[in-house]
Image (spheres, grey):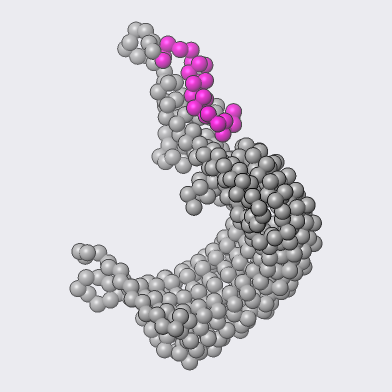
Amino acid sequence: MGLGARHQMTQSRHTGSHALVHCAQADNMAPMGLYALELCQLGLSDKKCAWLGSVLETQPYLQLLSLRDNHIGHTGIRRLISPLARGCRKLSVLDLSGNMLQSQGVRILAQFLVTSGQGLETLDVSSNGVTAIGARDLANVLVPEFNLSLKHLNLSMNQLEGSGCEAMGRMLVQNQTLEVLTLSQNNMFDNGCQALFFGLESNTTLKSLDISGNFISHVGARSIQTYLQSSSTQTPTDNQPGLQSLNVSANSLGDEGIDVLCGGLSTNRHLIDLIANNVDVTDNGMQHVCKVLKAGAVNTPSLLTLSLRHNYRLTRNSYAQLAEASKANHNILRIAADLQFEGWDEVWTKVEMILIRNTVYAMERYRVPLLMVARGRILLRDITHSTSANSTGIYSLPIELRRMILIALDKHSVLTRTQHISALNIACNPANHFSTKQELLAAVLANDYAFVHEMIKTVHS
């Protein structure tokens, strides 16, 4: 491989456990160190953490450490923290899920974040018996004054309950780094949901929230509706998009909860991914969902993906309504559902055809602005100072007719009139230069750029 760094991987498996090691090594030299270490399901105990700590202390290049599904408690994590602080300055991902840290262990982790964990971006402490006390300790350090970089936090399958989620809500009021927060299966109930979304109303950086399996009813759903209708989520921006993905699966929302949730979706311009599996919705609730889909006009940001799996009380009639409602919606790109009735293939074929149509429209919203500007540079150029005495060919046509030819490139009318004018004005002015396609698209699409960008990401996912 020459003089460049060479990556090697060794792996061993036994009784369902595995150790995965990525090494960085230069040719003809001693190993420089590990950059990823996964020691999962190996029965590591607190006592063995002393040995592991001595290893970690000598790994300055370590970026990922996964110790999931072991038997590490607060004593073990205390033995690991000091070596991590001294030796692993580049650590960005720490996975401690499926251990026995409890709240004492999380308090130690919180102290580590403040003193030496400013570079950590992902922390997973799911399934560790963490209570509200641990949640408060962690929330207290996830504020701007400690200058942390944490973007992904997983606290699922713990025992935060309402008071722990209230602490998370207070943290979200100030936090400016978290993008993904997972709080599934934490006995949140309605009071915890209300406290969480009250804090979320003041947050502009969180993009994905998972509150599945938390005994939330239509009462808690009202706090979600209030958030979706809040003024901070009405005008999309590139830098502060607001919540984009929400998972409310395995909660007893029922038809009333779905109705409340749809009331928020009807005005929200940021939430593009809704996962509502197993929420006890019936045909009556599906009518509210279909109403929201119909309201998703051609050029209005709305849901891109919708999951309604494991809602077994839905009948053929609901899915037939879903297919009809989707016809009016040019944005929806993914629908996940369980169709368990005779003749389901006929209904689902209609849905699939609509999703294919919308995928084409999404690609057109990306392609047409680029095409209009590129061809407009030729068709609309000023040839009054040309050496040719007379204009010939396409240039003999009136300028307005040439503009109409360019607008006709938008065969499916995926752009607004304002966007057409913007593209033509950019094409007319030779002084308009863009270093990337994204800059040009942002100039043409204006406020819709962030939404179209997410559409393209969904298409390619």
Residue 27 pos. (x, y %): 21, 70
Q: Judge from the rendering whether residue 7 lies leftward or rightward of residue 461; answer left or right.
A: left
* Viewer-proximal residue among 219 and 207: 219
Q: Where 426 falls versus 336 (above or below)?
A: above
* Viewer-proximal residue among 320 and 189: 320
Q: Identify which residue is drawn at 77% across, 64% down.
A: 217
Q: Could you tell me if residue 219 is visible in this image?
A: yes
Q: Does the magenta stretch include residue 16?
A: no
Residue 47 pos. (x, y %): 48, 92
Q: Identify which residue is drawn at 41% across, 18% down.
A: 382
Q: Where 17 falls versus 253 (above or below)?
A: below
* Viewer-proximal residue among 168 and 246: 246
Residue 314 pos. (x, y %): 72, 55
Over which residues does the magenta segment extend? Answer: 394-417
Q: Identify which residue is drawn at 57% across, 62% down.
A: 180
* Viewer-proximal residue among 235 and 102: 102
Q: Where 274 falls versus 52 (above or below)?
A: above
Q: Could you tell me if residue 234 is visible in this image?
A: no
Q: Judge from the rendering whether residue 178 lies leftward or rightward of residue 7; answer left or right.
A: right
Residue 55 is drawn in which quadrant?
bottom left
How many discs appear? 0
Identity of the residue furthest to the bottom in this view:
47
Q: Judge from the rendering whether residue 380 lies leftward or rightward of residue 322; answer left or right.
A: left
Q: Identify which residue is drawn at 54% across, 48% down.
A: 454
Residue 326 pos. (x, y %): 65, 43
